[in-house]
Image: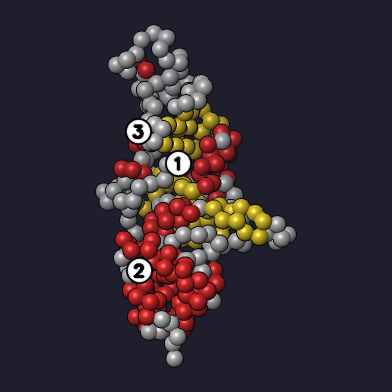
């Protein structure tokens, strides 16, 4: 006879509601190991109507790596079914990302040292990067910090990367390395609170142009052909701006012009393939990371 509680059943019935996921996650985590045991029992003994929701819940609370081989295959099937109808989300996107050409995006895994990749829906990826850092114990017994990244499907010929590894591309040598693997790499950053924007373009292993609002100097490299000359700024006057400045001081505006702006992606944006989740250390898996993992 099943020993799961009515509370667990009621939580599972709410999983299909996106607006309830955060509260469901908190309630499931509050149940602790007892909740995980109850979810595993539902996977084994039913009721049948809750088995799929129990699988989703185990993935949400980071217990997916504890599944047996049969349930792992079931979770993979669930993700692949969701991928068939995957579309962009209306959710607010992270404030930092990179974009690489879709034709050469495979190079980003080697460039950023990403491992254990798994197919991911947009919902999985965007929820995963909300909690992109975990501390685990390595083979040598030492504690280590691991990050995960979400590589999006192709949008208008580009793939974006979100998460901690993408934020690391603020370092020019990291962005340059990605461009060496992918041909091009574009970094974007924006902080609406401080009105702070940044962007950089790297090609063939070298950063050729960058901007950051509060950096000195704000601009590096020569203006690129698509940039609007500073003389077209209504406040322009000789000597007011750095000699190599332009009007391209908004990260989202630059992304929309050169690659793709995640804030403007919608149902009409061409989308191909599916996304990937990957981590920065082999063998860690995706279980150690906190937070709800939507599917």
**Residue 213 visible somewhere in the drawing:** yes
Residues tagged 1 and 3 counted as in contact (Cβ below 8 A):
no
Asked whether 33 or 114 is in front, the reply is 33
**Residue 70 visible somewhere in the drawing:** no
Quadrant showing the N terminus: bottom left
Badge 3 element: helix
Answer above or below: position of 184 versus 265.
above
Q: From this viewpoint, which residue is outermost toward the right?
A: 140
Q: How far across and down, in percent of the image, does residue 146 sit?
A: 59, 53
Badge 2 element: loop
Q: How far across and down, in percent of the image, does residue 119 sit?
A: 46, 61
Residue drawn at (42%, 56%) of the image: 127
**In the figure, residue 240 lies in which quadrant?**
top left
Residue at the disc numbered 1 = 96
> Closer to the camera: disc 1 or disc 3?
1
Among numbered discs 1 and 3, the one appearing first in the sequence: 1
Q: Residues within 10 Å of mark 1 (few under 14, many from 20)?
A: many
**In the figure, residue 25 lies in which quadrant?**
bottom left
Q: How far across and down, in percent of the image, does residue 294 sit?
A: 40, 62
Residue drawn at (29%, 16%) of the image: 234
Answer above or below: position of 47 versus 226.
below
Residue at the disc numbered 2 = 15
Quadrant showing the C terminus: bottom left
Q: Is residue 115 left or right of residue 91?
A: right
Q: Residues within 10 Å of mark 3 (few under 14, many from 20)?
A: few
Q: CA distance from mark 1 to mark 3?
A: 14 Å
Among numbered discs 2 and 3, the one appearing first in the sequence: 2
> Closer to the camera: disc 2 or disc 3?
2
Residue at the disc numbered 3 = 253
């Amino acid at each position: 006879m099943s020993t799961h509680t009515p509370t667990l059943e009621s939580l599972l019935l709410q999983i299909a509601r996106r607006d309830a996921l955060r509260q469901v996650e908190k309630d499931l985590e509050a149940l602790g190991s007892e909740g995980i045991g109850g979810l595993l029992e539902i996977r084994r003994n039913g009721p049948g109507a809750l088995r799929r929701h129990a699988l989703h819940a185990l993935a949400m609370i980071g217990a997916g790596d504890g599944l047996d081989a049969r349930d792992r295959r079931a979770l993979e099937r669930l993700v692949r079914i969701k991928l068939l109808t995957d579309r962009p989300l209306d959710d607010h996107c992270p404030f930092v990302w990179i974009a690489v050409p879709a034709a050469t995006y495979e190079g980003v895994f080697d460039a950023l040292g990403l491992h254990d990749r798994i197919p991911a829906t947009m919902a999985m990826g965007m929820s995963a990067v909300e909690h992109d850092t975990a501390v685990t114990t390595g083979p040598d017994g030492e504690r280590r910090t691991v990050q995960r990244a979400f590589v999006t499907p192709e949008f208008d010929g580009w793939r974006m990367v979100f998460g901690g590894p993408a934020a690391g591309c603020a370092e020019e040598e990291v962005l340059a390395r990605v461009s060496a693997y992918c041909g091009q790499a574009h970094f974007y950053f924006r902080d609406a609170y401080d009105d702070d924007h940044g962007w950089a373009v790297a090609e063939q292993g070298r950063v050729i142009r960058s901007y950051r609002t509060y950096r000195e100097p704000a601009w590096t490299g020569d203006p690129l052909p698509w940039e609007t000359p500073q003389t077209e700024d209504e406040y322009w006057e000789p000597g007011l701006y750095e000699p190599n400045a332009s009007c391209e001081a908004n990260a989202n505006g630059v992304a929309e012009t050169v690659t793709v702006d995640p804030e403007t992606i919608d149902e009409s944006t061409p989308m191909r393939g599916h996304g990937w989740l990957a981590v920065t250390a082999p063998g860690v898996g995706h279980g150690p990371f906190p937070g709800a993992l939507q599917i």
